[in-house]
Image (spheres, rainbow, N blue to C red):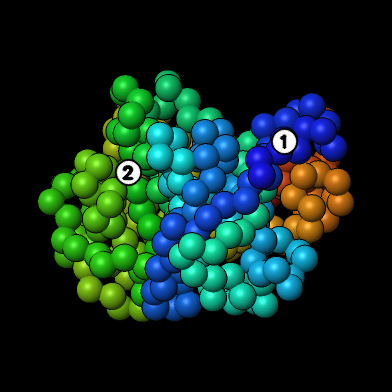
C-alpha cells in the first residue's frame, strides 16, 4: 500500500505518504535506545533533514508515534530512525522485529534550510535530537562550499561506539577527542559531550563546547556561521541564547507529542514570536523547524 495523504488533506500536504514498510533491521543499544531501518521508498524519496515520520508501533495500539528521520537512502528506499523508549508506544515498537511490517506516515513538516552565504554550519544534537543532525550532515557533505561541525551530547551511553577523532578542530580543549564514526568517515568533524564522564567527551553541554569553538573564530569567520539544533527544550533554549549572544542565525527542530501529525488536531501548537505579534503554529506541519529567535525571543529591552 502506498497512497498519498493529499486525498484527505489540503494540497500543501500532498507530499505525505502512507506506506506499509517492512522492517529491515532493528538494533538495540544501552539506555533503551533503538535504531530502526524500514523499507519506505516513498518517504525516503521525499525526506529532508529536520522532517519526521509518524509510525505505527503495534497493531494493538491505534495512536502513532512521531520519530525524527536520521538517514535515508533514496536509491535503496530505506529510512532510518533512532529513538528512545519513553512510554507504551515506543516500548511496543522496540519489540518489533525484522521482516514485520509497520505503517509509516511521512515525511512530514518543514526541514532545515541552510543559507549558502553561511557555510560554517554548526550542528548541535542532544539525545534523540541527534538524528536530524546526522541527516543534515549527510545532506551538507554533498553540497559544495559547506564545512559543517557537529557537536553531539548524551546523558546515556551513545548508541554507537565512539572512537578518537583524526580531524582537528580549533578551539576544542585537549582530550576532547571522542567522535561519531559515521560522521568522521564522512569527513565531518564531530565531538561528543556529556556530564557522565564518558572517555574522550567534553564534560558539559553541547553549547559549552560550541562556545569554545566560536571564541576561536575571527569576526569574518563568525559571519559565516549558522546554527542548527535539535534536542530537549533546555538545550534548545540554551542554543537560542548562545546564538543571540554571538549574533548568529539559528534554526531549531522541535519535538512535541502529537496525535494526527498532519495539522488537523492542533494538539502540537507552540507560540511563535514575530514582528506582528505572537502566532500559534503547529509543530507538525508549520515546523518542526523554526527560527530559534521566534521560539525563544529572549528578554525585551527598552529603547
Numbered badge on residue 266: none
* Circle number at residue 149: 2
- Residue 302 seen in the figure: no
Q: Residue at x 46, y 41 (%)?
A: 77
Compared to residue 301, the image places residue 222 above or below, namely above
Instruction: Please name which of the two marks, 1 or 2, marks the residue nearer to the observer.
Output: 1
Q: Which element type, helix, strand or loop, lies under badge 2?
A: strand
What is the crowding at mark 1: few (fewer than 14 residues within 10 Å), some, or many (at least 20)? some
Residue 73: image x %, image y %?
41, 40
Q: Is residue 19 above or below residue 198?
A: above
- Return the residue at label 1: 4
Secondary element at tag 1: strand
| Residue nearer the viewer, 184 or 276 | 184
Q: Residue furthest toward the left?
A: 166
User: In this view of the protein, can residue 178 be seen by the observer?
Assistant: yes
Residue at the (17%, 55%) spot, across then down: 165
Residue occupying image coordinates x 76% and y 28%: 12
Q: Is residue 98 above or below residue 11?
A: below
Q: Quadrant of residue 40?
A: top right
Bin the neighbour count of mark 2 within 10 Å (Cα to Cα): few under 14, some 14-19, many 20 and up. Answer: many
Measured as percent of width and height from the top left, residue 273 is found at: 75, 41
| Residue 76: percent from left, percent from top | 40, 40
Residue located 50% across and 59% down the image: 23
The quadrant in which the C terminus is found is top right
| 283 relative to 161 in the view: left or right | right
Distance CA(mark 1)–CA(mark 2): 36 Å
Amino acid at each position: 500500500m502506498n497512497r498519498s495523504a493529499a486525498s484527505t488533506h489540503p494540497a500543501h500536504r500532498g507530499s505525505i505518504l502512507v506506506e506499509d514498510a517492512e522492517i529491515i533491521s532493528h538494533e538495540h543499544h544501552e539506555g533503551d535506545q533503538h535504531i530502526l531501518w524500514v523499507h519506505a521508498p516513498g518517504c525516503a524519496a521525499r525526506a529532508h533533514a529536520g522532517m519526521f515520520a509518524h509510525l505505527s508501533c503495534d497493531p494493538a495500539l491505534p495512536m502513532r508515534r512521531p520519530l525524527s528521520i536520521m538517514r535515508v537512502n533514496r536509491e535503496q528506499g530505506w529510512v532510518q530512525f533512532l529513538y528512545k523508549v519513553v512510554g507504551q508506544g515506543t516500548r511496543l515498537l522496540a519489540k518489533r522485529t525484522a521482516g514485520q511490517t509497520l505503517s509509516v506516515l511521512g515525511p512530514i513538516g518543514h526541514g532545515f534550510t541552510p543559507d549558502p552565504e553561511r557555510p560554517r554550519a554548526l550542528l548541535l544534537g542532544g539525545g534523540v535530537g541527534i538524528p536530524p543532525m546526522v541527516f543534515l550532515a549527510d545532506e551538507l557533505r554533498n553540497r559544495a562550499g559547506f564545512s559543517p561541525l557537529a557537536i553531539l551530547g548524551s546523558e546515556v551511553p551513545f548508541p554507537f561506539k565512539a572512537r578518537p577523532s583524526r580531524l582537528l578542530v580549533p578551539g576544542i580543549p585537549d582530550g576532547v577527542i571522542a567522535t561519531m564514526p559515521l560522521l568522521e568517515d564522512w569527513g565531518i568533524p564531530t565531538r561528543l559531550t556529556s556530564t557522565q564522564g564518558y572517555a574522550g567527551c567534553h564534560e558539559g553541554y553541547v553549547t559549552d563546547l560550541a562556545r569554545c569553538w566560536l571564541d576561536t573564530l575571527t569576526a569574518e569567520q563568525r559571519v559565516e556561521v549558522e546554527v542548527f539544533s535539535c534536542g530537549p527544550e533546555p538545550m534548545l533554549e540554551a542554543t537560542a541564547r548562545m546564538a543571540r549572544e554571538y549574533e548568529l542565525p539559528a534554526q531549531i527542530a522541535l519535538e512535541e507529542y502529537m496525535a494526527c501529525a498532519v495539522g488537523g488536531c492542533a494538539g502540537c501548537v507552540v507560540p511563535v514570536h514575530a514582528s506582528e505579534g505572537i502566532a500559534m503554529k503547529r509543530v507538525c506541519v508549520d515546523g518542526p523547524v523554526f527560527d530559534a529567535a521566534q521560539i525563544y525571543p529572549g528578554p525585551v529591552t527598552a529603547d
